[in-house]
Image (cartoon, helix red, strand yellow):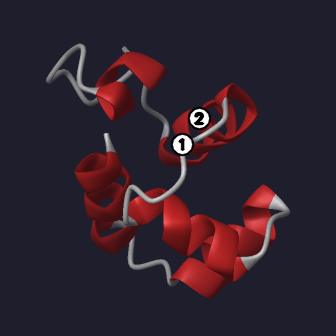
Amino acid sequence: MYKRIKELRLENNITQEELSRKLEISRISYSLYESSKRKVPLKILMKLAKEYNTSIDYIVGNTDKKSRN
């Protein structure tokens, strides 16, 4: 999961700072999620899935299907 959230961010050319603002959290908190030093709360997973137009299942590794459709 942690690798996927970083890959999605990089694929979308978004900095940690930009994404953390969209998620309404600090950049440090987001950085801790990407580095697997802190668990990602469901609320944040939902926001990430919406931001990247993907599913929570994709983010957490339950599927390799990236698109929601």
Q: Nearer the viewer, residue 41 or 48?
A: 41
Q: Which mark is residue 45?
A: 2
Which mark, by number, is residue 12?
A: none
Q: Quadrant of residue 19?
A: bottom right
Q: Is residue 13 above or below residue 9?
A: below
Residue projecting furthest to the front: 37
Question: Distance between the Cα atoms at labels 2 and 1?
Answer: 10 Å
| Front one among 6 and 52 | 6
According to the picture, the residue beneath numbered tag 1 turns out to be: 39
- Relative side of 27 to 33, left or right: right
Q: Residue at x 52, y 67 (%)?
A: 32
> At label 2, which amino acid type do we have?
Leu
Rendered-image quadrant of the N terminus = top left
Residue at 57 percent of width and 42 percent of height: 40
Quadrant into which the C terminus falls: top left
Circle count: 2
Q: In the shown orientation, is residue 9 left or right of residue 31?
A: left
Q: Residue at x 24, y 25 (%)?
A: 61
Residue 13: image quadrant is bottom left
The residue at 19%/21% (across/down) is 65
SS class, disc 1: loop
Name which of mark 2 and mark 1 comes first in the sequence: 1
Quick one: which residue is furthest to the right in this view?
24
Residue 33 percent coordinates (x, y): 50, 58
> In screen coordinates, is 43 left or right of 60?
right
